Image (tube, helix red, strand yellow):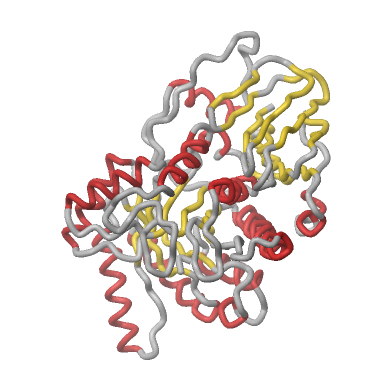
Amino acid sequence: MKSTTIKKFISALSCFTSIMLMCVFSNCNLFANAGEEPAEKSQPSDTSGFNKRLFIGIWSPNYADTKESADIEYKLIADAGINLIWSERYGDDAMTDYKLKISEPLGLKHIMPVWAQPQPNQALQDADDARWKAIVTKYKDYPAVIGFDMRDEPPYSDLSYYFVAREYIESQIQAEKFAICNLFPTYCTDSRIGPLGYEHYLTTYLEGVKPRILSFDNYPLVKSTAPDDQINPTREFINNLIVIRREALKANIPFWGFIQAQGWIDNRLPSKNEMRWLNNMHIVFGADGFSYFLWAENNYYHGAPVTATHVPTERYDIFKQLNQELRAYDFMFVPFRQEGFILKNLMANYSEVIPENLRKESYGHVKSIVTTGEMINGCFEADGQKALYLFNFDIARPITAKVIFDSRRKFELWGKGGFESGRKEARSLKVSLEPGEGKFLIF
């Protein structure tokens, strides 16, 4: 089940945002006008760029077999703050062509399904290779197509096949496009990830396939609501993020994840707070994107944001609101590189999974953080500019946190309202965070 750097697709940024990004990468003074109240800050108009905006995707839109239904479905997707689509199927050639073309003005990018895999004999292998290579040839020049999904969750035994498949695909496509597999989570069996374990599975894939983006899925919200029953899945989720983060940094590539957005046999339907928490868990560990699993209505899953007939459900507004929260400031945090964590009041079952060398008491000009709540605060840096992603780990309770600087310092705080406070010098900052909420502090 859908389970540094790539050329940019972004076309234009507003004047203010261009200046901000130049400051981040040129190490210039972000706070030159600290004595003035900040002006209204406009947002970039394009949401499709690597390293400029967060990729927020979906796994599998609802099937649309007419132009009218495609218009409705794809507009709903874009209006929800989505900019990336993974799909298991697209329909006939004429409808696929139409969907890709209407995606361009909506700012939607696609990862086309190839579904290549080893076959039991040479004749079948030759036929299947010809099939998926024809898909690459047919769709490689569409502007809305940014990648080709070779296979979802490839088992360890098949990885060597994708060494060759990736090489072929990327020899045929433009330099800014890519071939990708989405990988298993840590909790899979040896029959899937191999007898040497998850880290060997992961490094074998990275060293052989040499992907431009590392993608994985992990769905930690189990059906039982007893707190003790959630500890091990949450611990494993943190461990998975740590391993993926480490290997992505080592390979100097971005990483993406998948968000448990519906419910199924062993996994519960997430609340709005839980989905916000899942989104921000990926970001605080350094993800440059994530996708919701899944979007389409399905008999096996429940909680779709849109019905099979392209009508929004009560869940649609949750997706839209959470994405709007991140879109208010994603262009600020995406260019930064993850450097570690300041943990506050985190239970030992969780904190001990995070390596000791990544745990910090202070960072840059931040001397300490005081809070009564549970927090995982991500430490980020870009060309000497320091930042913290302040994150309320608690799914149930809002919290406040006091950030204490080493002296009077200038800062900017960004959150779901965009720019929230700062520009003037202060010794400390008080921050309020809803359950699962994150905010980005630059100092």
Residue 334, given in percent of the width and then of the height, sits at 55, 40
Camera sees residue 8: no
Compared to residue 198, the image places residue 48 above or below, namely: above
Q: Determine whether, in the image, residue 301 is placed left or right of residue 141.
A: right
| Residue farthest toward the top in the current orientation of the protein | 35
Percent position (x, y) of residue 25? 58, 31
Seen from the viewer's position, the closer of residues 167 and 37 is 37
Is residue 359 shown above or below 178? above
Q: Residue at x 47, y 54 (%)?
A: 292
Q: Residue furthest bottom?
A: 121
- Would you identify the image quadrant in which residue 47 lies? top left
Q: Quadrant of residue 206?
A: bottom right
Above or below, 154 relative to 325: below
Residue occupying image coordinates x 81% and y 51%: 357
Image quadrant occupied by the C terminus? top right
Q: Viewed as shown, does residue 343 lie left or right of 333? A: right
Decide which of 379, 219 is in the foreground and name it.
219
Task: Work out whether residue 277 can be spotted.
Answer: yes
Please tell me how many numbered marks the rendered image carries. Answer: 0
Where is residue 312 shown, x and y percent of the image?
A: 34, 48
Question: Closest to the observer: 214 or 175?
Answer: 214
Q: Relative to residue 365, is residue 83 drawn left or right? A: left
75 lies above or below 26: below
Q: Residue at x 66, y 35 (%)?
A: 433
Tell whether 406 sits left or right of 304: right
Q: Position of residue 142 (x, y in %)?
A: 27, 52
Residue at image x 32%, y 45%?
76
